[in-house]
Image (cartoon, helix red, strand yellow):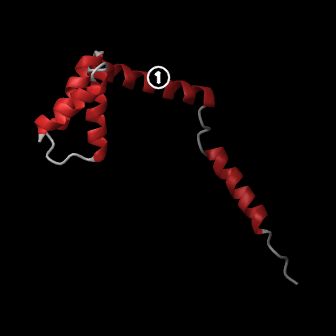
Amino acid sequence: MSKKKNTLKDLDEFLKQQAAVLVPPAPLAETVQSVRESVKHTATASSPAVESHAFSKEELCTMLLTSLEKQQNLTSEDTMIINTILYVRNQPNWKEAVRTYWSNRK
């Protein structure tokens, strides 16, 4: 009778042999530190290109309104934004401001 081969045992021996030949991986702490430095360097390199500008409420309203007025077909969401801007700008007389804006727009 022939002896059966244990393929799992052979595979285990092969993997152990290959593991002994390969270079052991770097410790996890070194890998994490390397990734952190890479991310930090990338963030630092891109930061000067980005300029932050704090807009006042009026500047923001003007930008939005100008942008929306350039569109030919306004969606219901666009109309709602315009009405909100008109409300923010003219809180005491917002109804009149909305009426006047839409009558002049058409």
Residue type at mark 1 is Glu
Q: At which x and y percent is residue 24? A: 62, 38
Residue at 78% of width from left, 62% of height from top? 9
**Residue closer to the observer: 35 or 12:** 35
Residue at 18% of width from left, 37% of height from top? 102
Total residue callouts = 1
Q: Residues within 10 Å of mark 1 (few under 14, many from 20)?
A: few
Residue corresponding to mark 1: 37
Asked whether, in this view, residue 66 is left or right of residue 11, the answer is left
Q: At which x and y percent is residue 16? A: 71, 51
Tell me which corner region of the image, top left, top right, bottom left or bottom right, holds residue 38. Answer: top left
Rendered position, 78 above or below 61: below
Tell me which corner region of the image, top left, top right, bottom left or bottom right, holds residue 12. Answer: bottom right
Q: Is residue 57 visible?
A: yes
Q: At which x and y percent is residue 15? A: 68, 54
Rendered position, 78 above or below 45: below
Quadrant in which the C terminus is drawn: top left
Q: Identify the secondary structure beneath mark 1.
A: helix
Residue at 21% of width from left, 33% of height from top? 99
**Residue closer to the observer: 38 or 9:** 38
Q: Is residue 50 visible?
A: no
Residue at 69% of width from left, 57% of height from top? 14
Q: At which x and y percent is residue 79? A: 26, 40
Quadrant in which the N terminus is drawn: bottom right
Q: Residue furthest right?
A: 1
Asked whether, in this view, residue 18 is left or right of residue 45, the answer is right
Rendered position, 79 above or below 61: below
Rendered position, 23 above or below 87: below
